[in-house]
C-alpha cells in the first residue's frame, strides 16, 4: 500500500508528513499546493524519482538540504506513495498517478539540481 511505501519517507518527513524543520519540510498540507500549481503534478513525481537539492521555501521556512531520489522503487511503488501524499489533500478532479506515468518520467534522467530548477519555475502561493 501507499502507507507501506511511505515508510521510506517517514524517517525524514515524519510519520504523518508533518516534517521536521529546519531540516525536513512538511508534506501534509503542502503537497496539495504543489499539485495545484501548473506543472506541479509532474514536479512532485520528479522529486520522488530523482531527489532535490538546493534552497527551497516551504510554509514560510527555508530548507537547504538534499533529498535522495527513489528511482530504485518500482513504478507501482512510486505511484502508490504519490497517491498516499495526495490522500492528505489534492485539488478537485485529481487523477491518481499511474505506474505508466512513472515509467515515462524515467526517460528524463534528471539530477536533483535540475529538479530544483523545475521547482523554481512553478508558481507557488
Ligand atoms: C523535499 C517527498 C523521502 C529529505 C521533498 C519534497 C517532496 C518530498 C515532495 C519537495 C517539497 C517541495 O518542493 O516543496 C518525499 C517522499 C519521500 C521522501 C515522497 C519518500 C519516497 C525523503 C527522505 C529524506 C528526505 C528519506 C531524508 C533522507 C528531504 C529534504 C527535502 C525534501 C531534505 C528538501 C530538499 C531541499 O532543501 O532542496 N521531499 N521525500 N526526503 N525531502 Fe523528501
Image (tube, grey):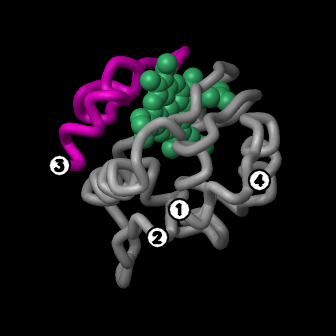
Residue hosting label 4? 118
Instruction: Determine whether the beta carbon of the residue marked 2 sits less than 8 angstroms from the nearest atom of ligand 1.
Output: no
* Crowding at mark 2 (Cα within 10 Å: few <14, some 14-19, many 20+): few
Between tags 3 and 2, which lies in front?
Answer: 2
Is there any visible trace of residue 42 in the rendered image? yes
List x then y, in percent, for residue 46: 61, 51
For the residues labelled 4 and 1, the Cα–Cα distance comes to: 19 Å
List x then y, in percent, for residue 45: 54, 55
- Front-most of residues 82 and 30: 82
Residue at 50% x, 69% y is 101
Residue hosting label 2? 100
Location of residue 9 (image quadrant): top left
Q: In the figure, 116 relative to 104: above or below?
A: above
Instruction: Determine whether the beta carbon of the residue marked 1 sits less than 8 angstroms from the nearest atom of ligand 1.
Output: no
* Earlier-in-chain disc, 1 versus 3: 3
**Whether label 3 touches label 2, CB < 8 Å:** no
For the residues labelled 1 and 3, the Cα–Cα distance comes to: 19 Å
Q: Quadrant of the C terminus?
A: bottom right
Residue hosting label 3? 1
Residue hosting label 1? 103
List x then y, in percent, for residue 53: 72, 29
Q: In the figure, 64 relative to 72: above or below?
A: above
Magenta segment boundaries in residue numbering: 1-23
Amino acid at each position: 500500500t501507499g502507507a507501506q511505501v511511505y515508510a521510506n519517507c517517514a524517517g525524514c518527513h515524519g510519520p504523518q508528513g508533518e516534517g521536521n524543520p529546519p531540516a525536513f519540510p512538511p508534506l501534509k498540507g503542502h503537497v496539495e499546493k504543489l499539485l495545484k500549481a501548473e506543472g506541479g503534478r509532474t514536479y512532485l513525481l520528479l522529486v520522488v524519482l530523482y531527489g532535490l537539492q538546493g534552497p527551497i521555501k516551504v510554509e514560510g521556512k527555508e530548507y537547504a538540504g538534499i533529498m535522495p531520489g527513489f528511482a530504485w522503487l518500482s513504478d507501482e511503488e512510486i505511484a502508490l506513495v504519490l497517491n498516499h501524499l495526495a490522500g492528505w489533500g489534492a485539488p478537485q478532479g485529481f487523477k491518481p498517478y499511474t505506474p505508466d506515468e512513472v515509467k515515462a518520467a524515467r526517460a528524463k534522467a534528471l539530477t536533483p539540481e535540475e529538479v530544483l530548477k523545475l521547482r523554481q519555475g512553478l508558481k507557488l502561493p
